[in-house]
Amino acid sequence: MSASSGRPPDPHRRPAASRAPLPARTYTVRRAALLAGALALAVALAALVAALARPSKAAHRPSAQPRASARRAHAHAHAHGRPPASADATPSPAQAVASVLAYTPFVKEGGDRGRDVALTFDDGPGPYTPGVLDVLERMHVHATFFVIGEMLRYFSASALRELRDGDVIGDHTETHPEMALLPAHEQHEELFEQMARIELLGGPRPQLFRPPYGSYDATTMRELRRLHLLMILWSVDTGDYLQPGVSTIARRALAGAHPGAIILMHDAGGTRTQTIAALPRIIRGLRARGYDLVTVPQLLADDPPPPGLPLPSSLSGD
Ligand SMILES: [Zn+2]
């Protein structure tokens, strides 16, 4: 679109060359030669610009958008097992987060008009994350991972795999503190360092934040606003971090599920074999009940929560 207007037209450089001082005797000849040369150069440049403009339009315009919606379509096709009917009828997931953030600083669950449910995993990446990702990949589910920054020092390969798979990475702080106990500058660092690490890995800047232990205060909310982060709480807690048994974890997830539900689980912070074992049951059970498993941004794109909900004063969780 702006390929031609952004590039300074080369003819502007031509007069400078022809203005160069020249001995009178050779002036006419040199000027004619220069003009001819400049003309040839201009023609060559015009051809070059035209040649460059065509592929660049093809590369930037038509394919950038289809790539994005193809990715969505791909995600949709995976999640629904059928081609998307209305991939372009809803805002992009990233746009959806921004538009929800415009009217609320937090989300506990999506709207109740659809059939979306979001699986979320906290505290990773860790040694059990590949096991979680294996199940998600095998069953074609995209999930949301709230990642601890310092875990990326050791397990960045899993975070890269999450990004490659089309999962969403949110901010779960740098070191997993109780945010409400920290002064403002430390809260800011906890949020910002994790975001910087994700960007260094090549991921998109996180738009979502989940507070460790459900701990936040007015300072947290102010820092989140500064960093354009939407706080994502949960409406179903599987309690999987306490390792209550595979069937208990699965039963809690399925019993608590409702349209717009955000289900809390963990892919690290302890042994997660129970979570991994429960996951196929949870996915099959939710699908049998007619739910679509989506990422949190997709949930917000498909069916955002209503405005005006009061911020919960505190939540327990891990
Ligand atoms: Zn946590």
Image (cartoon, helix red, strand yellow):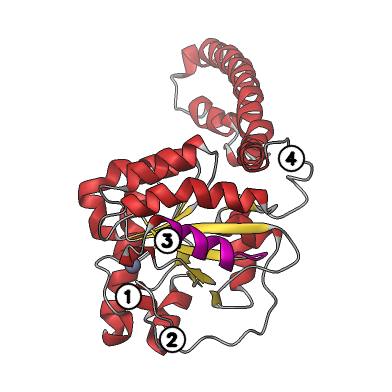
Residue linked to disc 1: 188
Please rate how many residues cluster around mark 3, counting C-alpha atoms within 10 Å: few if below 14, some from 14 to 19, many from 20: many
Please rate how many residues cluster around mark 1, counting C-alpha atoms within 10 Å: few if below 14, some from 14 to 19, many from 20: many
Residue 194, image x, y percentages = 32, 61
Tell me which amino acid carries mark 2: Ser
Q: CA distance from mark 3 to mark 4?
A: 28 Å
Which secondary structure lies at badge 1? Answer: helix
Q: CA distance from mark 2 to mark 1?
A: 20 Å
Which of the two labelled residues, at mark 2 and mark 1, occupies the earlier sequence position?
1
Q: Does the rendering let one see residue 202?
A: no
Residue linked to disc 2: 314
Which of the two labelled residues, at mark 4 and mark 2, occupies the earlier sequence position?
4
Tell me which amino acid carries mark 3: Met
Residue linked to disc 4: 84
Tell me which amino acid carries mark 4: Pro
Residue 74, image x, y percentages = 62, 36
Which secondary structure lies at badge 4? Answer: loop
Q: Nearer the viewer, mark 2 or mark 3?
A: 3
Q: Nearer the viewer, mark 4 or mark 1?
A: 4
Q: Main secondary structure of the magenta part?
A: helix
Q: Nearer the viewer, mark 3 or mark 1?
A: 3
